[in-house]
Amino acid sequence: MVKDLINDFFEKKLITAYHTQKSYRANINKYFRLLDKDINTYFSPKKPSEQYEKDLSKAFMLMEKNSIPMLTRKTFFNSVKQFFCSTDKRLKDLEFWETISKRMRGYAPQSEKDVPNAAEIKTVLSHGNTLSRAMFLMQCSMGCRIGELLALHPTDIDTTVSPTTIMINKTYNPREKNHYKNGTKTKTSRVCFMSDEATKAYQEWMKERDAYLVTSAKKSKFDKDLNDKRVFPMSDENAREIWERLVKRSGLYKKDIVTNRLTLHPHCLRAFFRTYLGHADLAEHLMGHASGMDKFYRNMKPEDLAKEFQKYMSNVSIFEVPPDLTGIHEQLRQKEDELQKLKYDLQEQRLARLEQSADFETRIARLEKKPKEKN
């Protein structure tokens, strides 16, 4: 019955996104576990609003006792409030909601989140295989969400152009028969690109993909779909576990002391793309964020957008980083200066010779015009 009540809430509020439903469900169930209450008998028209106020305050104090971060509590109570108001309209006027809103105002995230640089990502991926290198190099250079990456089909990827062009138009959803749901988090499709090294990694992975799927199906305790057409036929939990193992092997494994969450997780690769691409507005657009310049880039032709990305592609490459040519550039500049000076000196010498030649010719002409002496 618990599942039915929560599903009714999702239907009333038109909440369809898999991860949103997952978050709401976890928070709502947690509320009733904290209070040791039965969701089936909790709501009643005869129950006074004061009792709901008391229970909500008790839940807050239990979270306070356990030092739960304020923003985690804010998300928690937002889920509970939506569920309460959907179940009983009288509960939208509880004083607790205003109190909690004021209590949470001004709090910033307490959890640590690392934004890795190329050297750190290289260290992590050096411990990986063909699968992990392809998956995470693609995410580094595309700036996409992990769910968008796991929903990709080979038909979404065009390696015949440079840089490789990808159409993002769906996201991973394990409840769907084909493992994805049409539409992204922002409900819009977009074009993005990936680096040359990510393209090579992708092509190498596709040689092994089918064998991986067969082997994975034999090992899995769940029924895996051997007709899964996705580039990476796995769940997001599996992808995160692969990343976490690599981080542990690399020696960069660290958890936040407040939230106990991994500080270097797959979403950090999206942050890497945003931080290091070298063009903030372009990065925001390729990531699917709405910004002041989004309309400008949305109106650009794909081939022009590709040229823009190619200018900055090396900044989000991990293994194929261009060599440092600073010294060579300085030497070339010096040689150019020397060449220019030599050209100037030659020009000066040429002019001098021309002047001498002109003077000589003038004197010859004067001599020719001089009358001859009589004998």
Image (cartoon, rainbow, N blue to C red):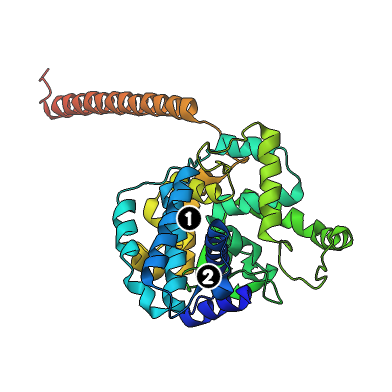
Which quadrant of the figure has residue 123? top right
- The answer to whether 342 is drawn above or below residue 228 in the figure is above
Q: Secondary structure at mark 1?
A: helix
Residue 79 position in % (x across, y down): 46, 65
Which quadrant of the figure has residue 82? bottom left
| Residue situated in front as seen by the camera: 342 or 330 | 330
Residue 333 position in % (x across, y down): 40, 28
Residue 293 position in % (x across, y down): 33, 62
The answer to whether residue 360 is left or right of residue 291 is left
Q: Is residue 67 visible?
A: no
Residue 369 position in % (x across, y down): 12, 29
Inspect the image, locate mark 2, and give the three-letter code of the amino acid beneath it.
Answer: Thr
- Residue occupied by mark 1: 309
- Residue occupied by mark 2: 184
| Residue situated in front as seen by the camera: 108 or 1 | 1
Q: Secondary structure at mark 2?
A: loop
Inspect the image, locate mark 1, and give the three-letter code of the amino acid beneath it.
Answer: Phe
